[in-house]
Image (tube, rainbow, N blue to C red):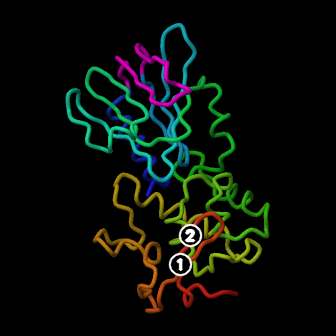
Amino acid sequence: MPEGDTVWNTARVLEKALTGETLTGSDFRVPRLATTDLNGWTVAESASRGKHLLLRLTRDGRPPHTLHSHLRMEGAWRAYAPGERWTGRPAHLIRVVLRTARSVAVGYHLHEISLVPTADEDSLVGHLGPDLLGADWDPAEAVRRISADQSTSIAEALLDQRNLAGVGNLYKAETLFLRGLWPWTPVSGVADLTGTVELAQKLVASNRGRWTQTTTGSLRKGETSYVYGRRAQPCRRCGTAIRKADQGERITYWCPRCQPEP
């Protein structure tokens, strides 16, 4: 699931493949950048901000630029050696190809692809709240932002990237289970917002550096989550059937006994 930890891991893949290398070619398969040529630009840094990926590029005599992309639900970057077969996804899903002398980075099913002066990055990510995996992580600021709307549900507040950047549906559902919170509880009804956002950060950070996401501590298939993806299966704590329902534009999972409606 492309949440904050997955995006952070993807940034490390691109860092290993591209950072310090000069691009020998680029291919953008999106209309707005179809004629863009990054040949001769050097990849100075690969960074993540919440669910956003930022490749910062430099070239003598020109202002630094940032190539921005968003994975959403289906996006992925893969790195290959020159001449290696691209096996990540079907070819029709390729949106970006970046080549260097020692590697090829291929972006599949990417969204919101844009190239802007690095000085203008805030136009793309400046609205985001504190990054759960960033140096700017500040639980007090996340709580301040969430508290600005006391009537919204805690589930929707955690998913709002303007409050804190990096929580997706998986970590939302698991955080609320571990805190014993009914997903539709209004922010005003959450006794310990600080503890809630700090737990969300710990869950995301615990999976940084690996691709298998777990909130239970187990990496075995079928044992990695408490409620997420487990509709009608017994709760690991009490045995009650896990429920699933639409909530806003997303779905949510919860245990009706461990997370009772107030």
Tell me the magenta residue range: 20-42
Residue at the image point whose x is 20% and y is 28% from the top = 83
- Examine the structure image and report whether residue 30 is included in the region drawn in magenta: yes
Task: Estimate how packed mark 1 is, as few (under 14), some (14 to 19) or many (20 or more) residues with alpha carbons within 10 Å.
Answer: some
Instruction: Relative to 4, say whether 45 is above or below.
Output: above
Disc 2 residue type (three-letter): Ile
x, y percent for residue 108: 40, 41
Mark 2 = which residue? 251
Q: Which residue is mark 1?
A: 244
176 vs 36, nearest the viewer: 36
Residue ID at (55%, 11%): 62
For the residue pair 192 and 87, the one nearer the viewer reads as: 87
**Is 49 above or below relative to 239?**
above
Residue 2 in picture, x, y percent from top left? 46, 53
Q: Amino acid at mark 1?
A: Lys
Tag 1 and tag 2, C-beta contact below 8 Å: yes
Q: Is residue 45 left or right of residue 32?
A: left
**In the image as oriented, which residue stretches furthest toward the front?**
92
How packed mark 2 is, by other alpha carbons closer than 10 Å (few <14, some 14-19, many 20 or more), is: few
